[in-house]
Amino acid sequence: MSSIEDLDLSFTNLNGANDWLEVVSSLPNLKTLDMSACNLSLMSLSSFSQFSHSKSFTPLESLQLRNNEINDIPKFFGDICTLRELDLSGNNLNGQLIEHINDLFGCAKDSLEVFVLASNQLWGSLPDFALFPSLKEIYLLSNKLNGTMPKTIGNLHNLEHLNVSLNYLQDVISEAHFSNLSKLLSLDLSGNSLTLEFDFNWVPPFQLEELRLRSCKLGPRFPNWIRTQWNVTTLDISNAEISDTVPAECYLRFMDLGNNRFSEKIPPWIAEDLPQLIVLILRSNKFSGSIPWETCKLKYLRILDLSLNDFSGIIPQCLNNLTAMAYKAYSSTNLFEGGCMGSHGLNYMYIGDYVDSAMVALKGREYKFGKNLGLLKIINLSSNKLTGKLPTEITSLLELVVLNVSKNNLIGKIPQTIGQLKQLESFDMSRNRFLGEIPSSMSELQFLSRLDLSFNNLSGKIPSGTQLQGFDATCFTGNRALYGPPLTQKCPGEETPNQSLSTDNGSTEDDEDNRDEFKKWFYVGAGIGFAVGFWGICSSLILKRSWRHAYFLLLDNMKDWLYVAMAVNKEVAEIATEGDTFNLDAAHVYMSVRTRL
C-alpha cells in the first residue's frame, strides 16, 4: 500500500470512523485524495492537521472534498506546499469569501492551480487572486457574491477557466479585467448584473472556446470582440439586450441567442457555417420570415428552439434530416465533444438550465424529465405564425422527447404515424386549427406525460382504453366535436337509461317549466299593473283640485243613493209581503221609487 498515489474514498461515510487518518498518513506517495460525499465536517478534519507537516502529505497535489458539511477552510490546507487542486464545492461555507481565502495564505498559494468553491453560501466581492500566481482555473459559481470584480484578476497570466456565474455581482467590466489573460479558454459571467463595456475595436489577447454571458448587458450592438473568437464552440449571450444582426461564427456547437431583440430573417449561413451545431436557441426574439430549409442540414442538432418569434410559412418537410434526433445517443456521449470544458466539465448544468427555461415556455411550469439531460431531443416552434400542415416526416425523428408547435395557424390532421415517436414525453399542439380524429397510434406513446390538444377543430371519439384518459379534460377542451373520456360529453348512442328516460319525458318537463314561468311573470305583471294604476289615480287627485272635489262629491252622492235605496227597499219589501198574496200596488210604488232614485 505504500506505493499508492491515488486514493478515492468518495461516498464513504467516514463520520464515525477513527482510523482513516492513520491509513491515509501511511501512504507516503499519495498525490490525489478524494473524500467527496463522506459526511465530513470541520471537526472531523481538525485532527488532520497533525499529519499535514508529515512526510505523508509532502507529495499531495489534489484534495477533493466535495459535498460534505465543512463550514470553514482549515488553515493547515495553506501549508500543503505541493497542493495544486482544492475542491470544496457543495459544502456549508458561508461568510465573506476573502476571509476563507486568507486561510490559504501559506506556501499553498504559490502552487495552487485549480480552486473550486462552487455551490456554497459565500458573499462579498472577489478577492485579489493575483496573490495566487499559479491559478489556472477558478470556479465560484452558485454562491451569493454581491460585490465587484477586481481588475487585478487580469494579471493571472496562467488563467484558463473563470466561472463566477449565478451570483449577484454588480460591476462594469472593461478591457483591464482581461488585459493579460492570454491563455483564457472559457469565461462564464452568466446570471450576474454585469455590464461589459469594451472599445469597439478591442481585440482580446485570448481565443475562447466557451463563452457564456447570459443576462449580462452587452447590447444594443453585437460585441465586435466576440467576432474575433474563432475557436468558440459554445456561445450563450441570451437576455443580453442585443438588437443587432446575427454574426457568423464558424465552430459553434452551442448557440443561445434567446431573449434578445434580433430581427429580420435567420441567415442561411447558420447551417452552412455551423455544421457541428448541437444546440440552437433563438427563442423570444423578433425573427421573421420562413424557417430556412438550410436548417435541415444541421444533422447533429439535438435542441432547436425557435419559439416566441414572428416566423411564418410552413414547417420544412426536410426536418427528418436532423438525424441526431432520429438515432439513440448513449449517456457517455458528450454534447460538447471537441470543445474545452476544463478539468471539472461543468457544461452539464447549462443544458439543465436551458431545459428548465424551455419547459416554462412549453408548460408554464417546471418539468423534470426522466432521462439524462444530455440525451434530450427538443423541437419548439411555439408562438409563431406558422401555417400549413404538421409534416409527416417529423415523425421519423424517433428519439424526439419534446415537440411543441402550439399557438400557430397550423391546419390538417395529426399524422397517423405519430405513434412512432416512442420516446415522446411532451407533445403540445394547442391553439391551432388541426382537424380530424386523434390517431389511435397515439396510445403507443407510453412515456407521454404532458399532452395539450386544446382549442383546435378535432372531432370524433378520444381513443379509449389508453393513457389518454389519464390526462385532464382541459387537455382536450376547445374541440367542439370531440367526445369521450376524459371529456364529459358522451359518445352518440352511449346514453345511460336514466338519460334516455329524461329524454323521453323532456317535452312534459318543458311544459311544466313553461307553466311555472308563465305564473311567475303573471303575478309580476299584475303587481306592477296595480301599483301603476293606484298611484296614477292618487297622484291625479292630489295634484288637480277640481278632480279631487268632483271625486269626493261623487262619493257623497253614491253614499246617499245607497242609503235611500236600502231604506226604500226595506219599506217596499214589508208592504209587498203583507198578507198571503203579493200586493200589486205596493210593487208599483216600489218601481216608481227606484225610477226617481
Image: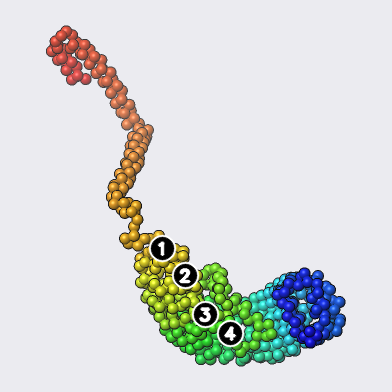
Q: At label 1, which amino acid type do we have?
A: Pro
Q: Residue under label 3, please give it.
A: 377
Q: What percent of the width, then of the height, locates residue 565? A: 24, 18
Label 3 crowding class (10 Å Cα cut-off): few <14, some 14-19, many 20+?
many
Foreground residue, 486 or 340?
486
- Number of the front mark, 3 or 1: 1
Q: What's under tag 4, amino acid-wise? A: Thr
Three-letter code for the amino acid on which mark 3 is drawn: Lys
Spatial CA distance of label 2 from label 3 is 17 Å
Left or right of 246 in this view: 508: left
Residue type at mark 2 is Leu
Name the residue at 79% across, 87% down.
Answer: 3
**Quadrant of the image containing the N terminus:** bottom right
Q: Considering the numbered disc 4 on the image, is that residue within a helix, a strand or a loop?
A: loop
Q: Secondary structure at mark 3?
A: loop
Q: Earlier in the sequence, mark 3 or mark 1?
A: 3
Front one among 128 and 492: 492
Per the image, label 2 sits on a secondary structure element best described as strand
Q: Position of residue 361 (x, y in %)?
A: 52, 72
Which image quadrant is residue 195 in?
Answer: bottom right
Which residue is label 1 attached to?
485
Name which quarter of the figure residue 233 lies in.
Answer: bottom right
| CA separation in Å, label 1 and label 4 | 42 Å
First reached walking from the N terminus: tag 1 or tag 2? 2
Q: Position of residue 438 (x, y in %)?
A: 39, 71
Considering only order in the chain, which callout, 4 or 1, is on the residue closer to the N terminus? 4
